[in-house]
Amino acid sequence: MQDPGDVLWVPVVQLAGNLAMAGYFYQRFVASQHTWLVRPTFQGIRQALAPSFTLGASRGLALLSFNFDTLLIGFLLNAAAVGLYSAAYRPLTAVLIISATYGLGLFPALSRAFSENHQQFRELVLRSLRLTAICAIPVG
């Protein structure tokens, strides 16, 4: 971003990305269900929303937890202190994002291994913990 007015493009680009993603998944739905109509039922909506609320609350609390320190500094001090803190914290943020991405990518494999073979799940957990330790020890 070169100009403060460029900030206005962020929600436009995000909306375009979300619409493209929704279009892609709708196309995949049509291909798998052989119909373009979505016929939701009350029971189906309820079954889908229950885990969604749990996941949404979890994501919201994680976001609050991740940004709480910056919010607290903003309330207690001033914008300059927030800027200095954020700049100093940026390298650690990159490491945290990488580890979170690794965890998100690992979750489907862990779920599949747990449901199919508990021994395979145990081995996968041990390998992932070793890899996490190898990467985390130099950082912290």
Image (spheres, rainbow, N blue to C red):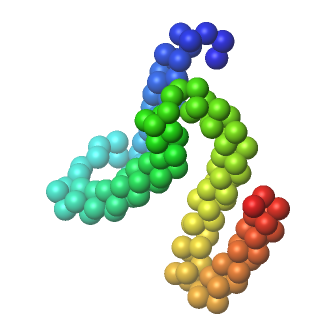
State the residue at coordinates (53%, 26%). Answer: 79
The total number of labels drawn is 0
Residue 105, visible in the rendered structure: no
The image shows residue 119, relative to residue 36, as above or below, that is below
The image shows residue 98, relative to residue 6, as above or below, that is below
| Residue sitting nearer the eye, 3 or 127 | 3
x%, y% of residue 51?
A: 34, 62
Q: Residue furthest left?
A: 42
Q: Horizontally, is 45 left or right of 92 in the view?
A: left
Q: Horizontally, is 131 left or right of 103 in the view?
A: right
The image shows residue 75, relative to residue 126, as above or below, that is above
State the residue at coordinates (40%, 50%). Answer: 60
x%, y% of residue 20?
A: 50, 32
| Residue sitting nearer the eye, 103 or 118 | 103
State the residue at coordinates (23%, 51%). Answer: 40
Figure quadrant of residue 114: bottom right
x%, y% of residue 39?
A: 24, 49
The image shows residue 48, relative to residue 69, as above or below, that is below
Quarter of the picture holding the C terminus: bottom right
State the residue at coordinates (29%, 46%). Answer: 38
Q: Residue furthest front?
A: 77
Quarter of the picture holding the N terminus: top right
Residue 73, visible in the rendered structure: yes
| Residue sitting nearer the eye, 84 or 26 | 84
